[in-house]
Image (tube, rainbow, N blue to C red):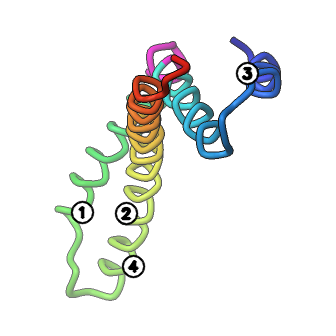
Amino acid sequence: MSNAENVDLINTLEFVDRNEQVHFARAQLGEQVKDFLRGPAGRYLHGRAKQQLQECQEKALECNPNSFFGRRKLKAIQRDAGIARSFMTWCADAIQEGEFSYRELEENYSQDPRG
């Protein structure tokens, strides 16, 4: 489903309240991130992030933290590792929030006498 179709779907559905709409959007985003990570671009980027973390770990072991240049190099390595780690964390967070929101919708729907 394209982004435009997702927006249209959210705009055409009638939600009980804003909270339900937010949960629906988060659940939908979580599914989109899963689909992205299953696809070639997502697998490539996730693989690159893992590779970058591994390379950073190896480079960090070679640094001398007691020297000026070693500390500078270590800071650059930590920055690069942080970028890769952030990408993976953001993806994981979106998936977890989506799963939480999906469960919230299920619980609320099962308690709703209209359902």
> What residue would you read off at disc 2?
77
Q: Could you say which is closer to the camera, residue 51 or residue 89?
A: 89
> What residue would you read off at disc 3?
6
> What residue would you read off at disc 4?
72
Does 111 sit left or right of 23 as displayed?
left
Majority SS type along the magenta span: helix
Q: Residue at x 37, y 56 (%)?
A: 81
> What residue would you read off at disc 1?
60
Marks 3 and 4: which is nearer the front?
A: 3
In the image, farthest residue toward the front: 113
Label 4 amino acid? Arg
**Residues marked 3 and 4 touching at CB (< 8 Å):** no
Can residue 44 be seen from the camera position used here?
Answer: no
Extent of the magenta region: 35-43
**Residues marked 2 and 1 touching at CB (< 8 Å):** yes
Between the C-alphas of marks 3 and 4, the distance is 45 Å
Between the C-alphas of marks 3 and 2, the distance is 39 Å
> Is residue 44 shown in magenta?
no
Label 3 amino acid? Asn
Question: In this picture, is 37 found above or below 91?
Answer: above
Q: Reading the chain from its start, which is encountered first: label 2 or label 4?
A: 4
Between the C-alphas of marks 4 and 1, the distance is 11 Å
Local packing at callout 3 (Cα closer than 10 Å; few below 14, some 14-19, many 20+) is some
